[in-house]
Image (cartoon, rainbow, N blue to C red):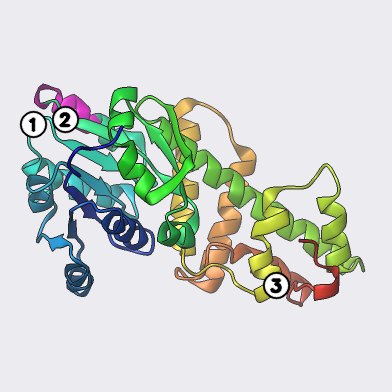
Amino acid sequence: MQFETPPRIGFIGLGSMGSGMARNLLKAGFPLVVHDTRTEVLDEYAALGADTADSPAAVAAATDAVITMLPTPAIVKEVVDGPLGILAGLPDGGTWIDMSTSVPEIADDVRRRHADRGIVVIDAPVSGMAVGAATGRLQIFIGGESEQVERWRPVFEAMGDPERILHVGPHGAGYATKLMINQLWFSHLVATAEVLAVGVRAGVDLGVLRNALIASPANSNFLEHDVLSILDHGDYDEGFAIALACKDLGLSVDLAAAVGVPVELSALVEQVYRRARAAYGDRAGEMTPFQLYEDLIGQPLRLRSEVVAR
């Protein structure tokens, strides 16, 4: 579905992810109204051609759909339901699209309390890191009614890879899918760090060990691709802070408890992440738990170019 006239889109939360997403909406020709707690960021977007608003309510009142991209469920709740929140300005029949990594309860509560207003709520969290947000190549996992998902698909396609924009189910399915993806990715990181550290300490060359693992049934996308940011460059991805990774892991374990599934391994991975956060600080990169194992063996895990598999 394409729009005859591009709708006005509100965007709240212009951090490391939201900034790139909002810029891509502007590039795609959507009139944009933005809000962030940092006035210097609003000045930057005004210079790019966006309108700015001094509250979430003002954004909602001036747009056809409001997107939120916020760091925690508590902030999502405040932005949506606070005195100057989205619900205070959103007209009956308006649309709120939450692209934060959050939990279903807040959106469920909005639908329950405002059922008579016909408000549309869609959960559409993303994967792809800040680089994916900047390049418009995010993967997007959408929970909601099919008709509304298709209605707003051109907006999603302005921010994400059209081939990886997935309608994963009803309300809440987007949130759950994103949390499970994060959980598995973090688990891959910890498992990879352990295996490489033990193998190197046992005398196996790092590049040879990694190539053997890639050629084996134990291969993973993380081992083949994502870990190279560390092994090649010592980059632990400070674009996404470990404090937020710990938040996501906590939400994942909480979701498991809510649905009654014991998750011993996921809980242990969460604790490894919290140990790394305590050791290296809240603003350390999301891949910093890898450094715990490097510190244990007393050397950084870095590849020699002649043994790197590509």
Q: Earlier in the sequence, mark 1 or mark 3?
A: 1
Position of residue 170 relative to residue 47, above or below, is above
Q: Which residue is mark 3?
A: 232
Callout 2: few (<14), some (14-19), or many (20+) C-alpha neighbours within 10 Å? some
Q: Kindly check if marks 2 and 1 are in contact, taking CB atoms under 8 A apart as contact.
A: yes
Could you tell me residue 201's position as x and y percent? 86, 68
Q: Where does the N terminus fall, quadrant-wise?
A: top left
Front one among 13 and 179: 13
Callout 1: few (<14), some (14-19), or many (20+) C-alpha neighbours within 10 Å? some
Position of residue 194 relative to residue 115, above or below, is below
Label ID, residue 119 = 2
Q: Which residue is mark 1?
A: 92
Q: Residue 43, located in which quarter of the rendered image?
A: bottom left
Q: Earlier in the sequence, mark 2 or mark 1?
A: 1
* Residue at 26% across, 52% down: 75
> The disc labelled 1 sits on which kind of residue?
Asp
Q: Earlier in the sequence, mark 3 or mark 2?
A: 2
Which span of residues is magenta-colored?
109-117
Secondary structure category for the residue under label 3: helix
Quick check: can you spot residue 100? no
Could you tell me residue 244's position as x and y percent? 43, 58
How would you classify the magenta stretch by its main secondary structure?
A: helix
Q: Is residue 60 left or right of residue 189?
A: left
